[in-house]
Image (spheres, helix red, strand yellow):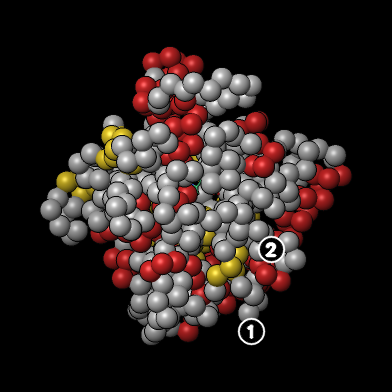
Amino acid sequence: DFKLSNVQGDILVGLSKKTEVFFFFRITDATAFKSQLKTLVPLITTADKATGEKAAIRAFKASRAHGVNGDGTNELGEITGDGDLLPIAGVNIAFSQKGLTALGITDDLQDPLFRAGQRKDARSLADKGTGETDEDFKPDWDEAFLQDSQEIHGVILVAGDSFGSVNGKLDEVKATLSANETSSIAEVATLAGDVRPGEFSGHEHFGYMDGISQPALKGVDDVDPKKPKPGQSLIDLGIALLGRSGDPVEGRPAWAKDGSFLAFRKLPQLVPEFDRFLEEKSKPIADDFDDAPTPADILGARMVGRWKSGAPLRITPLVDDPVLAADDQRNNKFKFNPQSQEMCPFAAHIRKMNPRKDLDQFATEQTPDLVGPHLILRRGIPFGPEVTSEEKLTKSTKYERGLYFVSYQSRLDQGFSFLQKQWANNTSFPPGENKKPGFDPIIGQAPDEVRSMTGANDDKLDEDLPLDRQWVQSKGGEYFFSPSIEALNGVLAG
Ligand code: N7H
């Protein structure tokens, strides 16, 4: 009974995006909202429509004979490469627990973190802030996400090829939600993200290619002859969608089926400070040959687990390999050696987040797969301007930039929240005798900010490298539920 047309497009496919707006709203008139939602639903981009749009972008790019980059989008849904674009704007909608409550829905989705909201999770995520308990903790977040004055009831995602298309579509959405001269919502905050320009398109702000590795889903991606790609994990649909095989949670309402929890995080990145650290802390190298990476490039790659091009250290530990990076048949085809961090540090971001083969030794009959249930669908987008020459010179951030992180999962305590707490922030992960991996140097968080990692120096693998600060910060977020189309038309519009 599974239909792509019943699932919102950003979850399973990724809305095609060169630019994306996150419109956070509060419901001011529940009755009006419900009836207006009925007219909003036809504007929503479903997974089958999103698939069609990707194919259209591919065909359009090919017809223009511009460099075709895979299907013209990466695995985050970002439209990569240059060239004129097909006008496209997609819409998705998701609700917080406060939003469901405002609509009079009393069913329990059986996800404690969703129910409590992200603010209550901030302390255990190790976000900075003050307060001794989850209840009275006040994180150092942007005002809007603290929700002291205005609650966030939901978010509307509008993504597309250009600011013009996206804004036009957002206006259409807003008009629908104020039909018959009754506005049913109020804006809490509007955030806009953009794929980086020119040669950096597809790269996040530290400079690393993003959107390479995503899990493929059984029954969705494995019917596509091009997927799973070599090295890509194939996981149960229920890891992403509620109520599907692989989602063991009982007692969810029937209408929650085919929805997914959306974790949103605003993560500013201190890029000049990060670069400065790489320059200061990297060891000089003797190798001097054409295309030899700089010491800073090597240290950065060991922190991420991939070179800036996206080429994985596990395959090419000593030099970057842009040809390998661009080949989707090879750029994700590797497993780690659980005994060794010579080629890639245990703590490297992509190893912490997907410890391919590192946990196999701990598998049991009851839990044969210790990684699959924690894989998430990432759909984030960078925000903020390019680093200016002034910031480069002074080596300090003046303009806020970073990542609007978005992930989808059927359980927040197994997906985003688990990855942050149990793997990134956990200094003894991945586990093993005589292993002291340390923090994920990219996203690992500690309240006191004293972090370190081993494996950064490939001559002295056990050496502990102090990481002088967190270059990725957290300025807030919320947990949302992205319902199926049937639920939007049914219980939510009810
Ligand atoms: Fe990460 N970065 O630039 O270093 N991430 N990430 N991430 N991330 C990945 O493989 C980055 C964040 C994951 O399957 C790549 O597609 C930055 C959070 C996962 O091999 C790069 C930020 C969480 C993967 C980055 C950030 C994750 C992944 C390689 C914040 C979850 C796939 C590109 C500003 C809690 C791992 C690729 C795999 C890959 C970076 C955040 C998770 C370059 C800068 C918060 C699961």
| Pointer 2 local density, CA inside 10 Å: few below 14, some 14–19, many at least 20 | some
> In the drawing, does residue 321 fall left or right of residue 148?
right
Q: Are marks 2 and 1 in contact (CB under 8 Å)?
A: no
Residue wearing tag 2: 227
Residue wearing tag 1: 1
Number of the front mark, 2 or 1: 2
N-terminal label among 2 and 1: 1
What percent of the width, then of the height, locates residue 62?
83, 45
Looking at the rendered structure, the kind of residue marked 1 is Asp
Looking at the rendered structure, the kind of residue marked 2 is Lys
Q: Which of 259 and 364 is in front in this view?
A: 364
Secondary structure beneath label 2: loop
Q: Check the image and report above or below for 2 versus 199.
A: below
Residue 136 appears in the figure: yes
Q: Check the image and report above or below for 280 versus 350.
A: above
Secondary structure beneath label 1: loop
Residue 43 appears in the figure: no
- The N terminus appears in which quarter of the rendering? bottom right
Which residue is located at x 15 percent, y 57 percent? 133
- Judged from this view, the residue extending furthest toward the left is 132
